[in-house]
Amino acid sequence: MKKINFILLFVFSIVVLNSCDSKDDTKDYVQSNLLVGSWKIKTTGELNNVGGVDFQNYVNSSDCNDDIIFNQDLTFAMNKYTKVGNDCIAQSTSGTYTLSNHNLEITTVSGGVTIKKLFVITELTNTDLEYNYNDDLGNLVFITLKK
């Protein structure tokens, strides 16, 4: 009987010691910012009269591809290109951005005035980005981009 009690005490001790492991369960895991990179605009869309979205291919105004570049340091540049001779010349808008859940807020400064715009991200992967926003007329606009 003493042997059985000793074995049970030994097994119980092992279980208790293993359950009291000193592992830190509150580790900080770095989540990569999937937004970082150069994005080419592929389609734009608007709501149709039955609640769906009608997408059209985005047409660049030149042979150059307009893009948006999001940097790791939370800055961005939106480039609209014009073809001059053989060169693509960018008219850039730049500023900062914040990303919180599905909300992307960009901030620019123009003529001393700070402008903030809110975009709602509906898809974000390593290669695909879709967001929507309300334009100046209150219309809901959808944009899809690819890296």
Image (cartoon, grey):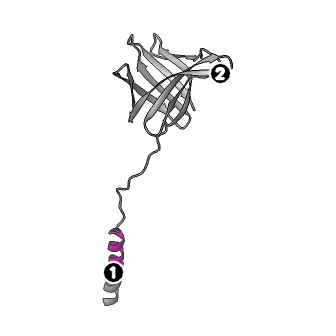
Question: How many marks do you count on the picture?
Answer: 2
Residue at coordinates 41% horizontally, 13% vertically from top-left?
139
Q: Is residue 55 left or right of residue 140?
A: right
| Front residue of 40 and 139 | 40
Residue 11 forms part of the magenta stretch: yes
Q: Secondary structure at mark 2?
A: strand
Residue at coordinates 42% horizontally, 51% vertically from top-left?
29
Image quadrant assignment for residue 11:
bottom left
Image quadrant assignment for residue 58:
top right
Residue at coordinates 35% horizontally, 61% vertically from top-left?
24
| Quadrant (top left, top right, bottom left, bottom right) of the C terminus | top right
> Which of the two labelled residues, at mark 2 and mark 1, occupies the earlier sequence position?
1
| Front residue of 21 and 147 | 147
User: Height in image: 81 above or below 99?
Assistant: above
Tell me the number on the disc at residue 8.
1
Measuring from the top left, give residue 8's x and y in whole percent. 33, 80
Q: Is residue 146 left or right of residue 132?
A: right
Separation (CA) of disc 2 from disc 1: 81 Å
Tell me which segment is drawn in magenta. 7-19
- Mark 2 vs mark 1, foreground winner is 2
Of the residues shown, which amino acid type is indicated by label 2? Asp
Q: Secondary structure at mark 1?
A: helix
Measuring from the top left, give residue 124's x and y in whole percent. 49, 34
- The answer to the question of whether label 2 and label 1 lie on touching residues, with beta carbons closer than 8 A, is no
Name the residue carrying label 2. Answer: 87
Residue 141 forms part of the magenta stretch: no
User: Height in image: 119 above or below 28?
Assistant: above
Measuring from the top left, give residue 127's x and y in whole percent. 56, 35
Residue at coordinates 59% horizontally, 14% vertically from top-left?
61
SS assignment for the magenta stretch, majority: helix
Q: Residues within 10 Å of mark 2 (few under 14, many from 20)?
A: few
Measuring from the top left, give residue 10's x and y in whole percent. 34, 81
